[in-house]
Image: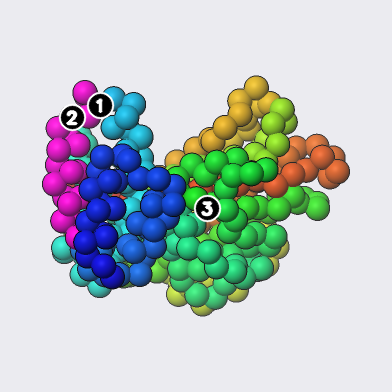
């Protein structure tokens, strides 16, 4: 890695002047060089502290800059968090709650890679799904919510829709605390065509088993996963034709001490007859551990 070039990109990002191509280059350096992630963590700690002191005075420009920075901070923290959570980056303190980054695979879907065409690949940190792929944004597709790429879900030939799925090994990032733990995760959805009603769904569950075993549980529907899980939660969103653009869903999931694997499942569908069903896009999926300091440890 060229350190001078990375510093130039880092400074440009702080000033919110990165071009789309430079942002892609910046994310690639973070994904492939531990020293870049370490440098960003050092910068992010200072910026996060400043950010928490200026929330009440933020402007649209600063909000936009931090929306783009959040997945990059997560990428940087991943290199430190795994296997050594005592040095992880605490993102915020809010009314007795501490939020700590939980790194997810291929943040922002900025690294192009073929995806296994199955419900769940039998490994952690691998996105998968039927008729699911990472695609560039723009052209006939909408702009990505962050970066240059996003996840595409194909139109369902039958049933309620297709799903993009990810398993994460929680044992590598669980905070060292005796306080109750939760996971907060947010995903963003977008239609491929305007003037249509849409249906988005987001489900999450924890399991005591390893990812290899959990991958065998999904036989037909998400109900298979829900019935075998330790904890589960989910939400659905039904934007109308008059509500275009990106739509977000946020989940909060309890994590018991014996939980080993987290499964995320993101679905989409166009209600109505099969001929009218279309592609959908997902981007900017982010997760955090939530430590509740208000509740006494068991």
Q: Residue at x 50, y 68 (%)?
A: 126
What x and y, as percent, mark residue 116?
62, 70
Image: 85 above or below 59: below
| Label 3: which secondary element | strand
User: Is 163 in front, or is 38?
Assistant: 38
Nearest to the observer: residue 3 or residue 219 = 3
Q: CA distance from mark 3 to mark 2?
A: 31 Å
- Residue span colored magenta: 39-58
The percent coordinates of residue 140 (x first, y second) are 67, 43
Tell me residue 106's x, y (percent): 45, 62
Q: Which mark is residue 149?
A: 3
Quadrant of image for the N terminus: bottom left
- Asked if disc 2 and disc 1 are in contact, CB closer than 8 Å, the reply is yes
Name the residue rendered at 66%, 27% in the picture.
240
- Give residue 58's mark: 1
Residue 213 versus residue 182 in the image, above or below:
below
Instruction: Name the residue tied to disc 2.
Output: 54
Question: What's the residue at 75%, 51% (across, down)?
Answer: 156
Rounded to the nearest angstrom, the CA distance separating label 2 from label 1 is 6 Å
Looking at the picture, how far across and down is residue 110, in whole percent?
Answer: 47, 57
Say what secondary structure mark 1 lies in.
Answer: loop
Q: Residue at x 60, y 56 (%)?
A: 135
Magenta stretch contains residue 47: yes
Specify few, some or many for label 3: CA neighbours under 10 Å numbering under 14, 14-19, or 20 or more.
many
Asked which quadrant contains residue 271, the reply is top right
Q: Secondary structure at mark 2?
A: loop
From the viewer's perspective, tell me whether residue 284 is left or right of residue 86.
right
């Amino acid at each position: 890695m060229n350190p001078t070039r990375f510093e130039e990109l880092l400074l440009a990002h702080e000033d919110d002047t990165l071009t789309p191509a430079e942002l892609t280059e910046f994310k690639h350096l973070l994904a492939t060089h531990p020293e870049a992630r370490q440098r960003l963590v050092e910068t992010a700690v200072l910026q996060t502290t400043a950010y928490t002191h200026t929330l009440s005075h933020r402007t649209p420009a600063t909000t936009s800059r931090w929306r783009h920075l959040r997945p990059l901070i997560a990428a940087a923290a991943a290199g430190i968090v795994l296997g050594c959570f005592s040095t992880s980056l605490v993102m915020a303190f809010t009314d007795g709650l501490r939020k700590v980054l939980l790194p997810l695979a291929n943040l922002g879907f900025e690294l192009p890679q073929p995806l296994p065409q199955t419900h769940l690949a039998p490994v952690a940190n691998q996105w998968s799904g039927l008729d699911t792929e990472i695609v560039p944004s723009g052209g006939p597709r909408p702009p990505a919510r962050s970066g240059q790429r996003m996840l595409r879900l194909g139109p369902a030939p039958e049933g309620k829709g297709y799903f993009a799925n990810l398993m994460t090994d929680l044992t590598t990032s669980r905070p060292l605390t005796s306080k109750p733990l939760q996971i907060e995760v947010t995903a963003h959805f977008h239609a491929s065509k305007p003037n249509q009603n849409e249906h988005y769904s987001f489900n999450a569950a924890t399991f005591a088993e390893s990812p290899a075993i959990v991958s065998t549980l999904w036989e037909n529907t998400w109900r298979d996963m829900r019935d075998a899980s330790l904890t589960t939660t989910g939400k659905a969103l039904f934007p109308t034709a008059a509500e275009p653009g990106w739509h977000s869903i946020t989940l909060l999931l309890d994590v018991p001490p014996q939980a080993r694997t987290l499964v995320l499942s993101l679905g989409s569908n166009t209600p109505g007859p099969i001929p009218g069903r279309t592609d959908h896009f997902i981007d900017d999926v982010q997760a955090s551990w939530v430590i509740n300091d208000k509740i006494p440890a068991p």
